[in-house]
Image (spheres, rainbow, N blue to C red):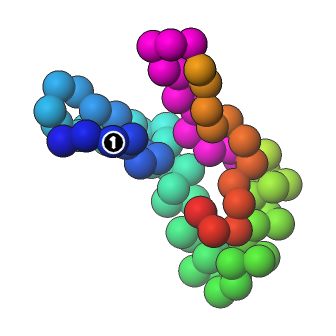
Amino acid sequence: MGGLTSLGYEAQGRTLVVNDAEAATVRGMFELYDQMGCVRAVKVEVDQLRLITKQRAYRCGKSVGGVPFSRGR
């Protein structure tokens, strides 16, 4: 297994485990889409809720993520 873990999961050894806090965010976004039926409207609501992408820190010190969701995510 390699690569970055998706929002809602954490790598433990060679296994993925659910990150409950992040999983709640993912479920919430899916519920918003189910209610609104429009990605654009979900994006507006997610921005108002100030939800951000998963933040990752690399061993070299570089940090990525922690920014507002884009419509494509």
Measured from the top left, where is residue 66 in percent x and y?
A: 67, 36
Q: Secondary structure at mark 1?
A: loop
Name the quarter where the C terminus is drawn.
bottom right
Is 24 situated left or right of 67 in this image?
Answer: left
Residue type at mark 1 is Gly
> Per the image, is 52 magenta?
yes
The answer to whether residue 62 is above or below residue 24 is: above
Is 28 situated left or right of 9 in this image?
Answer: right
Name the quarter where the N terminus is drawn.
top left
Residue at 59% across, 20% down:
62
The answer to whether residue 56 is above or below residue 18 is: above
Is 49 situated left or right of 18 in this image?
Answer: right
The residue most toward the bottom is 37
For the residue pair 28 and 5, the one nearer the viewer reads as 5
Measured from the top left, where is residue 34 in percent x and y?
A: 57, 80
Query: Toward which corner of the image does residue 69 lie, by quadrant?
Result: bottom right
Q: How many marks?
A: 1
Magenta region: which residues?
51-61
Crowding at dot 1, Cα within 10 Å, few <14 / some 14-19 / many 20+, comes out as: few
Residue at 48% across, 20% down:
58
Query: Toward which corner of the image does residue 36 lie, by quadrant?
Result: bottom right
Measured from the top left, where is residue 18 in percent x and y?
A: 32, 41
Q: Main secondary structure of the magenta part?
A: loop
Residue at 45% across, 13% down:
59
Residue at 28% across, 32% down:
11
Q: Provide the residue designation for mark 1.
A: 3
Query: Toward which corner of the image does residue 16 lie, by quadrant?
Result: top left
